[in-house]
Amino acid sequence: EMGSSGGEPIKRKEIYTYNADWEIYGMSWTVRPDQRFRLALGSFIEEYANKVQIVQLSETSGEFRQTAIFDHPYPTTKIMWIPDKTGSKLDMLATTGDYLRLWEVQPGGAVSMRKLLNNNKNSEFCAPLTSFDWNETDPSIVGTASIDTTCTIWNIETGQAKTQLIAHDKEVYDIAFATGTDVFASVGADGSVRLFDLRSLEHSTIIYESGTPPDSMALLRLAWNKQDANYIATFGQDSTGVVVLDIRMPSVPASDLNGHEAGVNAIAWAPHSHCHICSAGDDHQALIWDLQALPRPIEDPILAYKADNAVNQLQWSAGQPDWVAISFDSKMQILRV
């Protein structure tokens, strides 16, 4: 167990649980240091009217309480708090669903929408957004992924799209920035991981394919290791394994992490360690893997947690890296690792 900062309650709990009124899908830890144990949760209700709720753990009572709730059209496909490690910027979060929206939390706790970013002004139809990433190096940059095969890089301060590009042959399911502001990667229904550089967008690099089309398997998520930018992790639809890629040696996975007994739903690299990654899935498990032995095969996770049901979401706290959050059904749990 890793050490943690002062101000801990005397009786150190390893798990705290919060029960929402609906199934949870979107989930994000606040990054700013003055809001410990604060998360945003998005409802998964299969209709138009959905919710985003902000909850915070009272470290004295050991209970989560709601600090804000607001309406959201359709379920959030992703929620992210602004990557503000110093707490010097406005207290903002972003969501995707039908559009990319930016929200501000007022000092009193009320939440108001600041911007709705839409690049298809002339169409009455919007192509839903599957995911987005908020650039840590320059928080004015957000990249979104859409089912219309495109990725869009936004300047959220001006509200303008810097660039929109056809990224895949089919739907794009996820996007992630490397360290810095220029390089990002995406995955999608065509089964490929593609690398892009904003300085030379005329070509992209396919660094991995899950199979030969039409037999390739859709790749649902990707995660970029922020402590060692050579490593990207991804997983396929209904796949029980996580593929770890070394971008210096494309096409052949650096490792296959096979510890789940049912489909993987989420992955997260440790924000403070270059060689740890967590995965969670339909087998109710959250597993933490140590990749230090690479290139030797990684046989087993170093830590396993069994939830009460399929784990739909997983987020590792950048500000409090000894805590991982998972969600299953209408429950959110934070686990001390």
Image (cartoon, grey):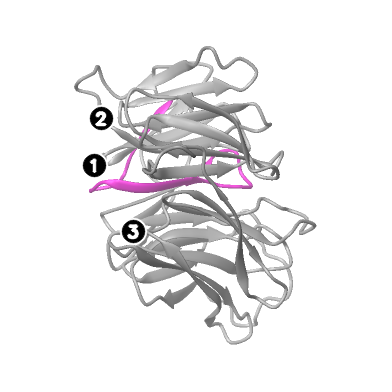
In the visual, does 103 lie left or right of 86?
left
Q: Look at 31% across and 44% down and name the residue there.
A: 259
The answer to which of 219 and 305 lies nearer the viewer is 219
Q: Look at 42% across and 44% down and name the residue there.
A: 129
The 10 Å Cα crowd at callout 2, few under 14, some 14 to 19, many 20 or more, is many
Q: If the image is split into quadrants, where does the N terminus sit? A: bottom right
Q: Which residues are magenta?
A: 254-277
Name the amino acid, label 2. Met
Residue at label 3? 311
In the visual, does 209 lie left or right of 334?
left
The 10 Å Cα crowd at callout 3, few under 14, some 14 to 19, many 20 or more, is many
How far is disc 3 from disc 2 in space, using C-alphas? 21 Å
Point out residue 270 in the picture as x, y percentages from the top left corner: 56, 47
Point out residue 224 in the picture as x, y percentages from the top left corner: 53, 36
The answer to which of 202 and 227 lies nearer the viewer is 202
As for residue 247 lying within the magenta part, the answer is no
Mark 3 or mark 2: name the one nearer the start of the chain. Answer: 2
Q: Look at 45% across and 26% down and name the residue there.
A: 245
How far is disc 3 from disc 1 in space, using C-alphas? 14 Å
Mark 3 or mark 1: name the one nearer the start of the chain. Answer: 1
How far is disc 1 from disc 2 in space, using C-alphas? 9 Å
Residue at label 2? 217
The answer to which of 316 and 257 lies nearer the viewer is 316
**Residue 295 in sight in this render:** no
Name the amino acid, label 3. Val
Q: Look at 53% across and 83% down and name the residue there.
A: 63
Residue at label 1? 238
In the visual, does 61 lie left or right of 303?
right
Check disc 1 and report its element: helix, strand or loop: loop
Check disc 3 and report its element: helix, strand or loop: loop
